[in-house]
Amino acid sequence: MTDAPGPARPANGDPATERYAAIMRFPRVAAGVGGVLALVSAGVNLFALEDTSGPLIVVTVGAALVCILALWNVVNFSPTAVGRLRALAQEVGGRFSLWKAGTGGYAGVPFAHGADHERFGVLDYDVAGSHVEVGHLSSQVSGGFKAPTGRRHAYAVIRLPERLPHMILSFGHLSRILGLRIVPDQWHRSQRVDVGFGRGARLFVADGGEHLARTFFTPETVQLLQRVGRSYDIEVRDRNLYLFAGRSVAAGSERRWNEQRAVVETLAASMVASGVWGSVRRQSRGMSFGDVRADVGRGVAIVFGVVAVVIVVLSLIVLNAQGLLG
């Protein structure tokens, strides 16, 4: 069943519909403004000025980047993807919500950090006795800063039979922009645990949870999660297993949508059928776990490094345009 109108309906005074419309409109406006500004500034530089203007080059590059990032969100978090989740709700007897305020009590990294969290295009349903939520998360970096393109995360949450320590299994998806990995993992290396994923993934486990991680990650589970990791980063916290990506589960072709649905549902069914939960229950009884720690020093160095690279690249572009590198 559904508790909100379909994604194609316009705002009509219903708060959920209005908030959904605003979320979908924001990247379109950013893409349009960025594209127009990039074209105008480039045109002025090429045809209206005798000498190339360095500041205008910076404006052109910045506006073009905003346009591209906004278009990425428009394409990968589209009404079509939301409509597919709505249709699936009717097929499987799930519950579809066009918009939900806040994080819904979820504590995965994209939910726990940032500000102004909103979920949209959310489907709740059961798979093999396990509760699954598939949706999209909109947020901002902080309450005092509104990013021109906004922040978007696609997610799926699978309810586990027993609680587990905080674990982050990174395949690099959340570190990518436009499909390119920009920054390395920010988690403290002292919490990295090897359970057989090889060099393609990095597992970080909260202090004291290493033995439970080795119990949970059987060879069969490792093999399954390696397939899941082709599209998602994975996080486990208490009784929730999170999948995160920069592209909606339901985006793209019909074939991709069916494949991604199968990935989520196969994982949910496998978690229910896993034989590790008795051991996990015994080992975790009476235990409390902390969080995977961020490596603050490394994070600061990464931020300053990225800023330095951007400044150098823009400076080289300006100097080359002005003929000073000839």
Image (cartoon, rainbow, N blue to C red):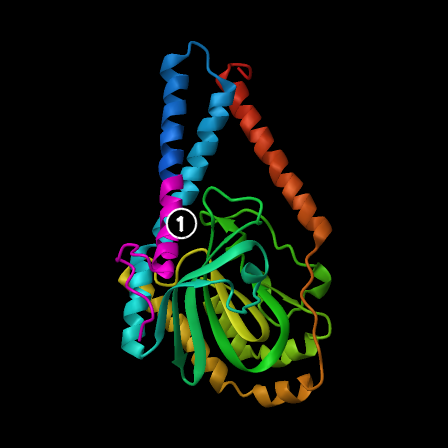
Judge by depth and name the residue closer to the eye, 228 or 238.
238
Q: Is residue 77 visible?
A: no
Q: In what quadrant of the picture does the N terminus appear? A: bottom left
Position in image of residue 11 (x %, y %): 30, 55
Residue marked by disc 1: 73
- The three-letter code of the residue at mark 1 reads Asn
Foreground: 219 or 298? 298
**Image vertical order of residue 166 relative to residue 182, above or below:** below
Q: Is residue 279 above or below residue 288?
A: below
Range shown magenta: 1-30
Q: Position of residue 120 (x, y in %)?
A: 40, 61
Q: Secondary structure at mark 1?
A: helix
Q: In the rendering, at what x and y percent does residue 133 appear?
A: 43, 72
Going by the image, does 1 lie left or right of 294?
Answer: left
Q: Residue at x 54, y 74 (%)?
A: 240
Could you classify mark 1 by the number of other residues whose Cα lies within 10 Å: few (under 14), some (14-19), or many (20 or more)? many
